[in-house]
Amino acid sequence: MRLFNYTFNYKQLGKALFFLFIAYFTYLMWLITIQYIPINFKVAFLNIKQTEIKLFHYQLAFFSHVYTSIFVLILGLFQFSNWLRNRYVKFHRFAGKIYIGLVLGIAGPSGLVMGYYANGGWFTQISFCLLAILWMVFTYQAYAFIKKGQIQKHKNFMLRSYALTLSAISLRLFKWLIVITFELPPMDTYYIVAWAGWLVNLGIAEIIIFSHLSLLNKTKTKVNV
Amino acid sequence: MFKSIFSLSLILLFSQCTSIKNENANVTMDESTKVTDGELVLEDGNKLYGFWVGKFEMDFQDEDYPIYEDDEFEYNKKINISIDKIVGERIEGHSVVSGNYRVFSGSIKRDSGRYFVEAREPGDHANDGIFKFQMNDTMLWGTWTAFDKKDSVRRIYELKRRIFQYDSTVALEEAEYVDYKKTIQVMLEEDSFEIPYYATSTQKIYEINASNTFLNEPDVANLKKGDLLIIRNAIYARHGYAFKNKALRRFFDAQDWYIPVNSDITDELSATERHNIELLMTYEKNAEEYYDHFGRF
């Protein structure tokens, strides 16, 4: 019990730290987002997308992606709180529907369009397109499972979905780490983070899912014994 | 008899008198035997006109020389002395050094095959001074002393005549470039004579020529801040731009082909160069803003 109590606190502390970590970088993402308000084609990332930004469908994709993804990031952060989920079920469902709606309706498809026009050629294009597709697939799966009442599977796919949502942060964080340590040229860095930015996150999500599963099996066997 | 000879010679004399001057008169004198009394022979002026380029060195014989100027080791700057006009004993020209274009005027005298020049800068600039140099057809050498006595800066130089011509194909040479400022600081701090190497740019600066190649986005997307800066400024250097920026000046002064000629070269840029400058500037700004920050490239 005492051991149980200790692990419980440790887990809570870890969760709180992770929450603060994500919250801080979400704030940085917010700062990146407001660079594009009001709509301006000559700012930040768009400075090196001058050919693409002339296309109307790219403009549409870019700005709808930027303006919605930040809310997907913020909403997802609160969905993993057990307390919030148990105490305010309605809020969890409402926020979840917005999250799913934004990903499937706007942020995902626009991400796919942007992925098609990604800098760096086919190597990065494939990565970003795959990212967008998996993002939508996982999010839809999570929705489908909760509709069927399969909570554990819903949890797992939401974890995968949010792991890909967080690639917005991890991609930039990895890029920053590579630049300050190895000082790689920008495009070489981009090749790495285009893939690592979401594969690492997805890997972590799978580890969490797997460990939950084994934990679940352990408790089951204990109960049986 | 006498009379007849006299009259004959008179006839001969007058018969020659068809013009008032010999149009073909030609008096030759050996170059080394000319006596000019300091008076300049103008046809020689042609050989003196033009750019004389070389190192503008601190005079280490001068006891007052400062080793550090603005707390910084002074490297040997490149100077371009241009002789623009010689009329009689008067000489006019200008010098380009440290990104400054300064005119001078003074006197030129000739003595035993050499020319002696003493010329002054206007004196309305903090770094104005007086040039005293000698020159012949191949060499120009002498001193420059600042007007400002408390500065007591003296420079010496030995310049060669150089023809400046814009060539879009000139590539950078892999000159040894050491950032003396940083080196000195490190040496003082760590008390070692190890010279650290500062790699702020990559090999790309020797491969990409933005004067004769039309650059597209993929050509510049993988370039680092330093590369973009050097590639763009190499365009200006080919046109003989006299850099105001100390670091750039240092970098290009080390290039053999580089001659500082003008402080404004805007009108001389080609269409390709203009395009490339705009592209490089965009990526430079982006690199400056985002390369080592959380925000994406």
Image (spheres, rainbow, N blue to C red):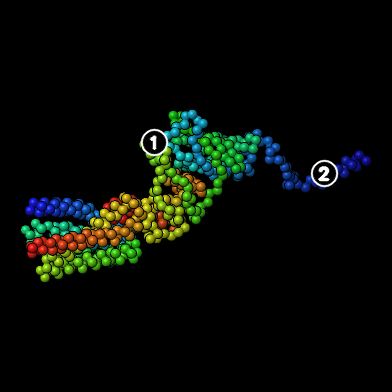
Q: Position of residue B136 (x, y in %)?
A: 61, 40
Label drawn at residue B13? 2
| Residue topped by disc 1 | B191
For image coordinates 26% across by 54% down, the residue present is A173
Label drawn at residue A19? none
How many marks the image carries: the answer is 2
Confirm whether residue A86 shows in the render. Answer: yes
Q: Where is residue B217 in the image (x, y as percent from the top left)?
A: 37, 60
Q: Tag 1, which secondary structure?
A: loop
- Labels 1 and 2 share a subunit: yes
For image coordinates 7% across by 53% down, the residue present is A1
Alpha carbon separation for disc pair 1 and 2: 94 Å
Q: Tag 2, which secondary structure?
A: helix
Chain letter belonging to callout 2? B
Nearer to us of marks 1 and 2 is 1
In the rendered image, which quarter contains the C terminus of chain A? bottom left
Q: Where is residue B58 in the image (x, y as percent from the top left)?
A: 49, 35
